Amino acid sequence: MDYSADVVIVGAGIGGLTAAALLQERGISTLTIEKNSYPGGSCASFRHKGYTFDAGASVFYGFGRDESSGTLNLHTRIFRKLGIDVPTIPDPVQIHFHMPGGFEVPVHYGREEFLGSLVGRFPGEERGIRAFYRELESVYDILSELPAGSLEDPVHVLKVGRRYPGKVMSLALKTLQSMGRTAKRNISDAELLKFIDMESYSWAVQDADATPLVNAGICLADRHHGGIHYPVGGAGAIPDALCEGIRRCGGSIRFGSGVEEILVRDGRAEGVRLAGGEVCRAKAVISNATIWDTFNTLVKDPRYAVAEEKFIRSPSWFQLYLGVDRKVVPEGFHVHHILVDDWERYREYGGTIYFSAPTILDPSLAPEGKHVVHAFVTDDVSRWNGCRRGSAEYRKAKEEFGASIIRRTETILPGLSDAVEVRLFATPLTHERYLNRYKGSYGPMLHPGQNILQKPQNCTAVRDLYMTGDSTFPGQGVIAVTYSGVSCASYLARKLGQPLDYL
């Protein structure tokens, strides 16, 4: 059979690009097919009237330089392997939380500085605070020593198990624990436990009880080790660098090409059919689409369909991209903020405001004398289904909802409404349209009580069809989907007889 490439990747999101880059570097030919004219999916940048906006992701792990942070500094290690430099700017504060009753916590890179701010507000909980965050640190300590690879690869699992038997056993036990239950064993203050919920909600969009302890340990400990770094030029620098690495190693990327179908015969993926009818055949196919888009749309055989209710469908977002006068952002203002104005509503759509001003770190993203402001709230496509795209009603609804978020944000940035000079709004319909995401969702989340290992892995029920991205283990977030890409490439490279070197 004539192959277009050894492996065809559907979608140029970060997970798919990572898998393609590592496979291609190993000499396994890849063809990445992307509907849009740019890579990255929700981790991308776009320009408008002189401003560079991050399409979605804005808080980035994985760029640390500390060699002891093994598995977790994935971006650093991947780009070093590809021979590509991605300049970044360290951010001294991960997120500044603003909560009801004047409760504010800036999460500093320095762990003691952060813990000290919590102890200062809750002196009676000092022992519990330190015990809880030590639990997260213990997860980090284990993961930072284990090499990244596929949990579905028996060779990898045996290697790691033989070399680190104690750590593997300890990590296995920790997969049975949730962040919330661990917090409640150590902490009793209700307000402090709500903050722990926000620590989880800030990246998992679930409260702490529903969040696996292992996931929490990755993000909430690594911020004090590898730290948070912003790529110079915006979020799009990450997928652009991955594309450069793929091309340097001889791989192909096709933009503006939509995949109509993943071809399956006798239970095996054979390639893809593009929207124009062209067929690209391969030894294996990797889908970077959500699990629902993959098996309910791209794979036509209904026997492989995945019911929505099998997992919790993560929310979509309403996003605001604002160009503002520089004077509205005061000296010393932090880059990333989360605003909760009512504990009863923080989990409702629109209840929590995520906010960033990346020009504080990288002024090149805006014209001189201006700032970029990116704000977003959870949302659901059902709230917009009555609107027709492009209609006056749709535009009015976006403007009104956007204006309400800007007004609420003025509690931390007074005068913002009057300082806005450029504004763009994106609804869940926008995410559904441009990112090809089922109902604009960012993939499946586990039901409370489900073990983290019940998250979909890279292998699927269709032979030679693999998945990567936020539908797969470990979940949502740029560093998580990067790990899924590493895991997928590791498994597939060994199967094709050219195993990867550990990062």
Image: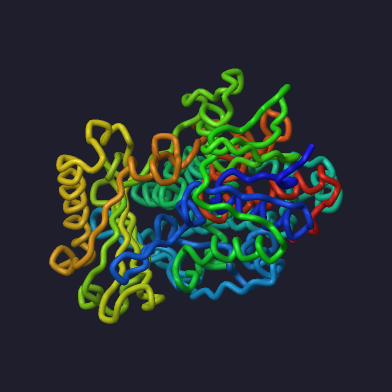
Closer to the camera, 383 or 63?
Answer: 383
Residue pictured at 70% horizontal, 24% vertical: 265
Q: Can I make out residue 115 in this image?
A: yes
In this view of the protein, which residue sits in the foreground, 89 or 365?
Answer: 365
Q: Is residue 4 left or right of residue 209?
A: right
Percent across and percent down for residue 144 are 68, 59
x 32%, y 41%: residue = 379
- Residue 271 picture location, percent across and down: 67, 36
Residue 62 left/right relative to 495: left
Q: Quadrant of residue 372?
A: bottom left
Q: Is residue 373 above or below residue 150?
A: below
User: Is residue 170 visible to the viewer in this orientation of the structure?
Assistant: no
At 60% from the left and 58% from the top, the residue drawn is: 137
Q: Nearer the viewer, residue 405 or 204?
A: 405
In the displayed structure, would residue 390 be above or below residue 136?
above
Is 179 situated above or below 21? above
Residue ID at (40%, 75%): 361
Looking at the image, which residue sits at the far top?
303
In the rendered image, the quadrant that contains the C terminus is bottom right
Which quadrant of the rendered structure holds the N terminus? top right
Q: In which quadrant of the rendered view does residue 369 lie?
A: bottom left
* Residue 102 spot, x, y in % from top left: 24, 60
Name the image colouring: rainbow
Horizontal arrangement in the rendering, residue 154 relative to residue 149 (left or right):
right
Left or right? Give the position of 335 relative to 279.
Answer: left
Q: Quadrant of residue 272?
A: top right
